[in-house]
């Protein structure tokens, strides 16, 4: 192979990786908000599943992708509200209630799919934008400037969430509530309200991540469409050490590793495919193990806040 | 009051439970229960069986029940034990159910059990059905080799096991029999149901120059979608998938489960409850090869003739595919 064709392959891989990191970025940044405030939401997978179904259903039935995406966010908000009521107000164990939300979302999505669509249907999906000039830059144009609008939305979410968390009074509240909720409460910050806001924002973004997978990636809905991507998003929050930029790096690395393993298999190099397929997951675990720093974790994570608790 | 409400809720939950499992109750002559690893509308393996049995419904006055999405041993075992005493034929539609069928079939000698893909009919009341997926795959490979312009073909494999090995090997040999220089790339997703991973793998194949794609398992609907969006061609297996993408699916190998089940029903009338390995081949009519009419212009008379000859060769036993 010539040098140019190698560049072509690498360009393709990077372009695919950027596009495919979008659903992880949505879901993981959302989960990051939730965890920053002290709530571990393990229901991301279920919320994404429901978001993916909702977005597909409205795009398919009403031929309106924007409506689908908005409805997926609405459904995400509702699921977040449920998670918040159970884990914040009723103080249920966050791990268990998250798994409950996951199973609920998964089950409802599969059932509604059977009732309202019932079989394989597809839509044309969200189209890639043709950005003039920038899109024409050799290599870089394909990598960065030939994606659909949701990819840019996801990439914009990274600096936006950083700004919100670190440069606004609300962001300060979120971080206070997630580390020292009692002190925050003493300072007059409404711990319960802040956590509600964060869990709901997180779930809304998870719904958006699910929507991306059904209307901008698969362009169809199928049972178990999310296939574990919600749990990967949770892992990426730990990977990124609760920082937006870290989450972005993790999402890109994971997507790139996936694109690479597919190319590696297709290139015909004789190698056990089982190892190739798990490579991205192993990579994430290894990086996680070597980069983990305890102090960056929100210290109140998974601890329900009880104002009257005298402990 | 609380008792009443909780009773009502229990009732509703049970009603929903029955709806989910799709249990249908009626007094009928022959009763068949089925257990599926995916759903009856998966456009692949499970749907092939469900549609097949449904085709016999009127003819034999069947009572049909089924449970979907069952993977783990506990669920499958309890479902089989619930169905076994009340049904004539119980089909566990997956190779992964072998051990559980082995266990349950011992306790219900008057019930016919069937499962597959397998060659191992473990007891006198167990059938093991076994599609020779490589036969239709070979034919598809031959056609694909004639149609490719880039001389690159992509296979999207689920997991390197069972039917997928047979299918991929048959397809590969079909291609090579026409032109050994055609490059056939194989990429596995490591899953049967990850639609998005299948689509991404298909897109990677297309990026690598493939203009014809194929693959098995329920995830393949995602790969077909990629072929349709990029204007590439697709060869199906298990079921006619042309409805998913009429402009992409050239032809399909179809598993005629209605004939397999018909065989079991007729044997039961003669007092035979199982104990047989049922290969599914062109010779016994348990396999079929179907073209998508919308793309029939791609198949010229010469190619059609060749396909018919291949099918005849399979029927007569002249052509046999060794799995590599």
Image: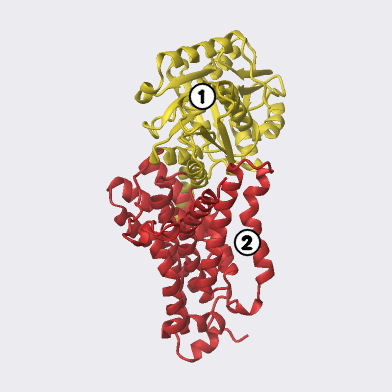
Query: Which chain is in red here?
Result: A
Q: Position of residue A248 (x, y in %)?
A: 51, 67
Q: Chain of mark 1?
A: B
Quarter of the rendering containing residue B138: top right
The Cα atoms of the two marked residues, 2 and 1, are separated by: 39 Å
Kindly identify which chain the residue marked by label 2 belongs to. Answer: A
Q: Residue furthest front?
A: A2
Placement of the N terminus of chain B among the 4 image quadrants: bottom left
Q: Position of residue B99 (x, y in %)?
A: 71, 34
Which residue in the rendered view is the most extreme toward the top? B316
Near mark 2 (Cα within 10 A), the count class, few <14, some 14-19 or many ≥20, is: some
Could you say which is closer to the camera, residue A302 or residue B204? B204
Q: Nearer the viewer, residue A89 or B28?
A: A89
> Is A306 above or below relative to B80?
below
Q: At x 60% / y 67%, what residue is drawn?
A: A239
User: Which quadrant of the figure has residue B163?
Assistant: top right
Q: Residue beneath label 2, please?
A: A284
- Residue A91: in sight, yes or no? no
The spot of residue A195 in percent (x, y) is 47, 76
Q: What residue is at 60 percent from the left and 12 percent from the top? A: B267
Query: Which of labels 2 and 1 is toward the front?
Result: 1
Q: Is residue A254 visible?
A: yes
Q: Are marks 2 and 1 on the same chain?
A: no
B199 vs B324: above or below:
below
The answer to whether mark 2 and mark 1 are in CB contact below 8 A is no
Applied colour scheme: by chain
SS class, disc 1 = helix
| As drawn, B85 above or below A179 | above
Which residue is the site of mark 1? B140
Chain B on-screen colour: yellow
């Amino acid at each position: 192979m010539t040098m140019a064709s190698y560049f072509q392959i690498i360009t393709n891989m990077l372009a695919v990786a950027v596009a495919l990191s979008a659903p992880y970025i949505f879901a993981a940044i959302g989960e990051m908000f939730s965890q920053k405030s002290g709530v571990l939401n393990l229901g991301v997978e279920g919320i994404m599943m429901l978001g993916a179904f909702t977005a597909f259903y409205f795009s398919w039935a009403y031929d309106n992708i924007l409506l689908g995406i908005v409805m997926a966010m609405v459904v995400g908000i509702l699921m977040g509200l449920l998670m918040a009521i159970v884990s914040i107000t009723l103080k249920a164990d966050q791990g268990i209630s998250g798994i409950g939300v996951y199973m609920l979302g998964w089950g409802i999505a599969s059932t509604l799919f059977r009732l309202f669509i019932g079989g394989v249907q597809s839509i044309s999906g969200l189209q890639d934008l043709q950005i003039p000039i920038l899109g024409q830059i050799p290599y870089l144009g394909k990598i960065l400037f030939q994606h659909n609008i949701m990819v840019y939305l996801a990439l914009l979410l990274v600096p936006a969430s950083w700004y919100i968390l670190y440069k606004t009074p609300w962001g300060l509240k979120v971080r206070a509530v997630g580390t020292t909720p009692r002190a925050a409460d003493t300072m007059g910050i409404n711990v319960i309200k802040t956590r509600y806001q964060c869990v709901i924002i997180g779930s809304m973004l998870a719904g958006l991540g699910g929507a991306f997978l059904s209307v901008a990636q698969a362009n169809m809905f199928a049972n178990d469409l999310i296939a574990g991507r919600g749990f990967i998003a949770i892992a990426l929050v730990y990977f990124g050490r609760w920082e937006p930029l870290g989450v972005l790096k993790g999402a890109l690395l994971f997507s790139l590793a996936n694109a690479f393993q597919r190319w590696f298999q297709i290139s015909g190099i004789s190698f056990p495919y089982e190892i190739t397929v798990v490579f991205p997951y192993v990579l994430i675990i290894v990086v996680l193990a070597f980069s983990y720093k305890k102090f960056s974790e929100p210290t109140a994570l998974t601890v329900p806040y009880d104002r009257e608790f005298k402990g | 009051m609380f008792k009443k409400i909780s009773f009502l809720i229990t009732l509703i939950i049970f009603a929903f439970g029955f709806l989910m499992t799709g249990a249908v109750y009626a007094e009928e002559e022959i009763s068949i229960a089925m257990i599926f690893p995916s759903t009856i509308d998966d456009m692949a393996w499970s749907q092939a069986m469900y549609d097949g049995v449904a085709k016999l419904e009127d003819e034999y006055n069947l009572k049909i029940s089924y449970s979907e999405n069952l993977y783990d041993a506990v669920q499958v075992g309890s479902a089989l034990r619930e169905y076994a005493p009340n049904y004539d034929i119980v089909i566990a539609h997956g190779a992964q159910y072998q051990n559980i069928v082995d266990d349950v079939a011992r306790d219900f000698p008057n019930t016919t059990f069937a499962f597959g893909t397998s060659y191992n009919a473990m007891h006198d009341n167990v059938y093991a059905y076994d599609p020779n997926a490589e036969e239709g795959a070979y034919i598809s490979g031959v056609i694909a080799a004639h149609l490719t312009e880039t001389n690159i073909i992509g296979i999207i494999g689920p997991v390197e096991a069972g039917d997928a090995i047979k299918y991929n090997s048959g397809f590969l040999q079909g291609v090579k029999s026409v032109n050994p220089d055609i490059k056939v790339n194989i990429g596995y997703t490591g899953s049967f149901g990850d639609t998005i991973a299948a689509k991404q793998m298909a897109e990677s194949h297309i990026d690598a120059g493939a203009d014809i794609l194929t693959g098995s398992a329920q995830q393949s609907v995602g790969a077909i979608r990629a072929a349709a969006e990029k204007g590439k061609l697709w060869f199906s297996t298990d079921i006619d998938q042309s409805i998913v993408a009429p402009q992409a699916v050239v032809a399909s190998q179809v598993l005629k489960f209605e004939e397999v089940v018909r065989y079991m029903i007729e044997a039961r009338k003669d007092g035979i409850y199982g104990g047989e390995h049922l290969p599914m081949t062109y010779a016994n009519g348990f396999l079929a090869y179907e073209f998508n009419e919308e793309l029939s212009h791609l198949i010229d008379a010469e190619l059609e003739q060749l396909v018919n000859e291949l099918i005849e060769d399979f029927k007569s036993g002249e052509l046999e595919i060794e799995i590599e």
